[in-house]
Image (cartoon, rainbow, N blue to C red):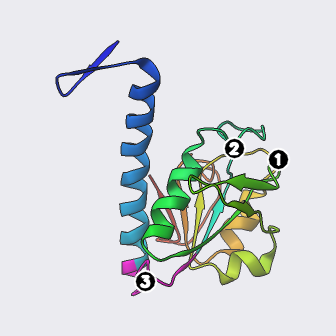
């Protein structure tokens, strides 16, 4: 058992609360990035890269990407995702969302690209080159040179 704010939580609940906190921060960071570009989350096109729980797998159960997508959709964003290992995801609502192909057009049309799972199949230099703005939650773009302000790290 872990003690959080005076409450004993089983280990899986602790992880769930931790991830919600981390990706809640990620959502606010995404909002700040869009606001800097004079855009609101509502109506923005966001592309989430990586829906799997862990790198180079297709297991999306309890994936933080599901929370990121849900939180942004609740704010009115049009959210698409791409994962080379998962063709579709089941959201909390029970609906199934199909992935979108990772193309130059998909990257350039997105107001923000968020890297949630750092799959080795992703071409990070091409992602940074073709996207308008990137929020990298996994430090996957650490070796990619980019103009100032184009890539934000969580």
The Cα–Cα distance between marks 1 and 2, rounded to whole angstroms, is 8 Å
Residue 110 placement (x, y as % from top left): 63, 78
Task: Bin the neighbour count of mark 3 within 10 Å (Cα to Cα): few under 14, some 14-19, many 20 and up.
Answer: few
Looking at marks 2 and 3 on the same chain, the residue that comes earlier in the sequence is marked by 3
Residue 81 percent coordinates (x, y): 69, 63
- Residue 28 found in image quarter: bottom left
Question: Which quarter shows the N terminus?
Answer: top left
Q: Which residue is mark 3?
A: 37
- Tell me: 14 left or right of 133: left
Q: Which residues are magenta?
A: 35-45
Q: Secondary structure at mark 3?
A: loop
> Is residue 9 inside the magenta stretch?
no
**Could you say which disc has been placed on residue 85 in the image?**
1
As drawn, 34 above or below 71? below
Provide the major secondary structure of the magenta segment: loop
Q: Residue at x 37, y 79 (%)?
A: 36
Under tag 1, what secondary structure? loop
80 vs 32, nearest the viewer: 80
Which residue is located at x 74 percent, y 45 percent? 119
Residue drawn at the location 82% of the way across and 52% of the way down: 84
Q: Position of residue 128 (x, y in %)?
A: 66, 67
Residue topped by disc 2: 52
Give me the C-alpha separation between circle 2 and circle 3: 29 Å
Residue 125 in the figure: left or right of residue 42: right
Please identify the residue farthest to the left as the structure is shown.
6
Q: Residue at x 71, y 66 (%)?
A: 127
Cα separation between marks 1 and 3: 32 Å
SS for tag 2? loop
Q: Are marks 1 and 2 in contact (CB under 8 Å)?
A: yes
Earlier residue among tags 1 and 3 = 3
């Amino acid at each position: 058992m872990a003690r959080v704010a005076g409450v004993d939580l089983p280990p899986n609940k602790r992880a769930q609360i931790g991830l919600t906190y981390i990706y809640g921060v990620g959502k606010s960071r995404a909002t700040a990035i869009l606001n800097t570009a004079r855009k609101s989350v509502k109506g923005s096109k966001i592309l989430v890269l990586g829906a799997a729980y862990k790198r180079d797998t297709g297991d999306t159960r309890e994936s933080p990407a599901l929370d990121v997508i849900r939180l942004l959709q609740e704010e009115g964003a049009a959210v698409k995702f791409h994962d080379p290992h998962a063709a579709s995801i089941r959201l909390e609502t029970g609906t199934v969302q199909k992935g979108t192909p990772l193309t130059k057009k998909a990257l350039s049309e997105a107001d923000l690209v968020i890297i949630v799972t750092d799959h080795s199949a992703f071409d990070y230099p091409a992602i940074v080159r073709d996207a308008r703005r990137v929020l990298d939650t996994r430090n996957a773009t650490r070796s990619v040179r980019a103009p100032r302000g184009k890539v934000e790290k969580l």
